[in-house]
């Protein structure tokens, strides 16, 4: 494939990023996603909409988030300078809310009066319940029954925010099934309901829309690193489940050819086992949840469950733009295992006094591998996309401790 | 189209039109609860009153279906069903029944993995008459719809209550065989059908097409069947039949001895609804 002039022109008008993306949905939903696409296009040109979005990002979410030089971690690893983009400092503790604010403003613009969402670890569910509370809209969150059991604090937070949590027992009762149930709800409530998808996946326009709302991460990073170092970083590193925090960081840098970009998938117990969530490095192209992308599946096209210590990365698919960037070789995709992520989690906590979520701990595991091999004048920026308070029970259990 | 398959479906609708009654379309998932029982059941359906057989191609993530059909898919998959075996089932059914049209209904991913052109070729040779692929809207016609039509395999499209008059011609453009009207905004096996609304919708669709219009989703009882049969060219029952299959399983999911008998008796009751001429 020839190298394109720009990596930032996608998707095309049918929502395709090369082979990937598209709109693979039932007819009932088709008019709705076309309507959403129109509203979204209008919002991009609507100054009042953009000003309102900026207002909430600044005063409600707390943006811009700092770009922080991780001095002790840098000294410990003895190589490249490491910066953290501190999206864990956002209201609700992760990058998820950047997108939720954008989508609920769209819902309002479209006169929708009811919000639904799917959630895995509960971070997107909490962010959705938060904005629904703020804008006074009823909210239903679909969550796998197994995830409800292992993410009790987030379930309680959502309940406090007056969201209704619907436990999903169909299929295997995980994030993919929660997404199936949310789609089923949407099909049954097409008139009044807005579906806030939490990642850069699903039918067009969601992958582009979520990317654009998350791109605030990359835009800020670019300005901040230029201010701090007077130049762009050598490497960007972010973790990938569906891929929204990574897409948000990467997108503004895609045409900066000298910036090496690395996405880190959840390797679970290892790519040589059946228990991982690495769709790009361990999957094949297929069609699920409205888009064509890399999937964990068997020869018959049946979807295989993902596994990761981090519930937020536990998804058998990946955003279609990542699938395209992998094939174009613009972004390098690697994986980190559960135990590498656990080690990184502890190291960061000890050295920097920051408890990262298990999701960005995967990105950090990759930084730990790379930084020592790089010289001291090189710069790595890692997206610290969530804080780890929600994970302390999982980590305690993995470390064999009772709290 | 001129192949034998296509004319099989067309012939069936023409024949029923002469009889002055609607087609009774039965849905079961291929391989539910297992290949052997499923084949026996499908073989018994025409005699029980099925005019057209719709067979579900099992998929782990059937987004437009309710719990009944999703569970049936998972039962079939747990017992080793694959798309290849679904085609085998049709082939074996065809050995004894050259006349009853068979429609395969499912989701795109298993077909995509099988290979679209291979699926069309093997489907036609097994005796499949048409397909319904839920997650391939007209916007994705180049994926499978166009090659299927070119090869002589019907591509049956769903029209829904959200398909307005502006969009309807797009939906109908490459539809063949018949139009499947989804009677509710919702998933299979949930809300009940509203005959007055369906009547208006069928009339609306018929203003745009000469194809037969079959109606499905939310049709559960012989009375529902009779109501819809008086206003549409075909009536589809799925979840209610699939639930009968589930009712005839032991706690380990194995079929009880009378499964086929009990399910076909139910199908026979439902089929009475289409016997009254319009």
Image: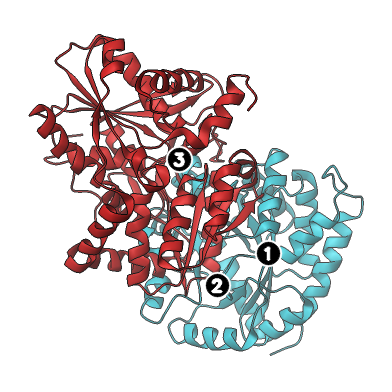
Chain colours: A red, B cyan
Residues packed near mark 1 inside 10 Å, few (<14), some (14 to 19) or many (20 plus): many
Residue A281 location in percent, x, y?
40, 27
Question: Which chain contains the residue that carries disc 2?
Answer: B
Residue A146 quadrant = top right
**Rendered view: A13 above or below B75:** below
**Label at residue A373:** none
The residue indicated by pointer 3 is A317
Q: Is residue A113 left or right of residue B28?
A: left
Q: Chain of mark 3?
A: A
Lower position in the chain sequence, tag 2 or tag 1: 1
Establish whether labels 1 and 3 are both on one chain: no
Disc number lying in front (2 or 1): 2
Would you call the spot at circle 2 few (<14 residues within 10 Å), some (14-19), or many (20 or more)? Answer: many
Q: Position of residue A213 (x, y in %)?
A: 29, 52
Q: Secondary structure at mark 1?
A: loop
- Residue A254 visible in the picture: no
Mark pair 2, 1: CA separation: 30 Å
Confirm or deny contact between disc 2 and disc 1 (CB under 8 A).
no
Q: Nearer the viewer, residue B187 or A59?
A: A59
Q: Which residue is mark 1?
A: B100
Residue topped by disc 2: B185
Q: Is residue B141 left or right of residue B179?
A: left
Query: What residue is drawn where x is 74% and y is 73%?
Result: B220
Q: What is the C-alpha distance between the residues marked 2 and 3?
A: 27 Å
Q: Secondary structure at mark 2?
A: loop
Which residue lies at the image location 25% right of the left edge and 30% below the top edge?
Answer: A68
Q: Residue A285 placed where, x, y %?
A: 42, 38
Q: Are marks 2 and 3 in contact (CB under 8 Å)?
A: no
In the image, what residue occupies the spot 58% across and 31% down? Answer: A393
Q: Nearer the viewer, residue A252 or B169?
A: A252
């Amino acid at each position: 494939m020839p190298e394109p002039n720009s990596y930032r022109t996608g998707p095309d008008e049918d929502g395709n990023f090369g082979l990937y993306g598209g709109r693979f949905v039932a007819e009932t939903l088709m008019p709705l996603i076309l309507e959403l696409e129109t509203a979204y296009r209008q919002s991009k040109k609507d100054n009042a909409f953009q000003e309102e979005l900026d207002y909430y990002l600044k005063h409600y979410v707390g943006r811009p988030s700092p770009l922080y030089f991780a001095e002790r971690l840098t000294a410990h690893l003895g190589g490249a300078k490491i910066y953290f983009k501190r999206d864990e400092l956002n209201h609700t503790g992760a990058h998820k809310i950047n997108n939720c604010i954008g989508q609920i403003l769209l819902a309002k613009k479209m006169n929708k009066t009811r919000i639904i969402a799917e959630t895995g670890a509960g971070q997107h569910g909490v962010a959705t319940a938060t904005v629904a509370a703020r804008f006074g809209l009823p909210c239903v969150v679909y969550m796998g029954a197994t995830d409800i059991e292992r993410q009790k604090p987030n379930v309680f937070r959502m309940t406090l925010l007056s969201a209704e949590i619907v436990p999903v027992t169909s299929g295997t009762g995980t994030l993919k099934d929660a997404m199936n149930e949310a789609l089923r709800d949407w099909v049954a409530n097409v008139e009044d309901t807005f579906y806030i998808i939490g990642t850069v996946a699903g039918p067009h326009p969601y992958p582009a829309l979520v990317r654009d709302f998350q791109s605030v991460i990359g835009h800020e990073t670019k300005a901040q690193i230029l201010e701090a170092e007077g130049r762009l970083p050598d490497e960007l590193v972010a973790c990938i489940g569906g891929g929204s925090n990574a897409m948000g960081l990467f997108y503004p840098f895609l045409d900066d050819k000298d910036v090496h970009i690395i996405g880190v998938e959840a390797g679970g117990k290892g790519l040589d086992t059946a228990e991982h969530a690495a769709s790009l490095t361990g999957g094949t192209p297929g069609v699920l949840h409205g888009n064509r992308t890399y999937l964990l599946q068997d020869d018959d096209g049946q979807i295989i469950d993902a596994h990761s210590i981090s519930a937020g990365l536990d998804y058998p698919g990946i955003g279609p733009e990542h699938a395209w960037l992998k094939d174009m070789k613009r972004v390098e995709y690697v994986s980190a295992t559960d135990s590498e992520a656990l080690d990184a989690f502890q190291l960061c906590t000890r050295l920097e006094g920051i408890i990262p979520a298990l999701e960005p701990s995967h990105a950090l595991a990759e930084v730990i591998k790379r930084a020592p091999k790089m010289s001291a004048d090189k710069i790595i920026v890692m997206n610290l996309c969530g804080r780890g308070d929600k994970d302390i029970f999982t980590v305690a259990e993995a470390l064999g401790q009772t709290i | 189209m001129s192949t034998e398959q296509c004319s099989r479906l067309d012939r069936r609708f023409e024949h029923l039109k002469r009889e002055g009654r609607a087609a009774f379309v039965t849905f079961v998932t291929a391989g539910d609860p297992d290949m052997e029982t499923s084949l026996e059941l499908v073989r018994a359906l025409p005699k029980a009153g099925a005019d057209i057989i719709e067979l579900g191609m099992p998929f782990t993530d059937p987004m437009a279906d309710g719990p009944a059909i999703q569970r049936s898919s998972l039962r079939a998959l747990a017992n080793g069903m694959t798309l290849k075996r679904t085609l085998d089932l049709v082939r074996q059914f065809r050995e004894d029944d050259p006349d009853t049209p068979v429609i395969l209904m499912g989701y795109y991913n298993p077909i995509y993995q099988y290979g679209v052109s291979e699926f069309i070729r093997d489907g036609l040779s097994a005796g499949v008459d048409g397909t319904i692929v839920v997650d391939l809207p007209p916007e994705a016609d180049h994926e499978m719809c166009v090659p299927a039509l070119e090869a002589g395999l019907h591509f049956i499209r769903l029209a829904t209550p959200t398909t307005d008059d502006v969009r309807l011609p797009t939906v109908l453009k490459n539809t063949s065989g018949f139009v499947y009207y989804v009677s509710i905004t919702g998933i299979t096996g949930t809300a009940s059908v509203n005959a007055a609304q369906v009547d208006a919708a069928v009339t609306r669709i018929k203003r745009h097409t000469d194809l037969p219009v079959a109606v499905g989703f939310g049709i559960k009882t012989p009375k529902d069947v009779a109501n819809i049969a008086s206003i549409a060219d075909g009536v589809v029952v799925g979840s209610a039949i699939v639930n009968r299959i589930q009712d005839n399983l032991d706690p380990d999911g194995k079929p009880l001895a009378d499964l086929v008998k009990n399910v076909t008796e139910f199908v026979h009751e439902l089929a009475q609804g289409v016997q009254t001429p319009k």
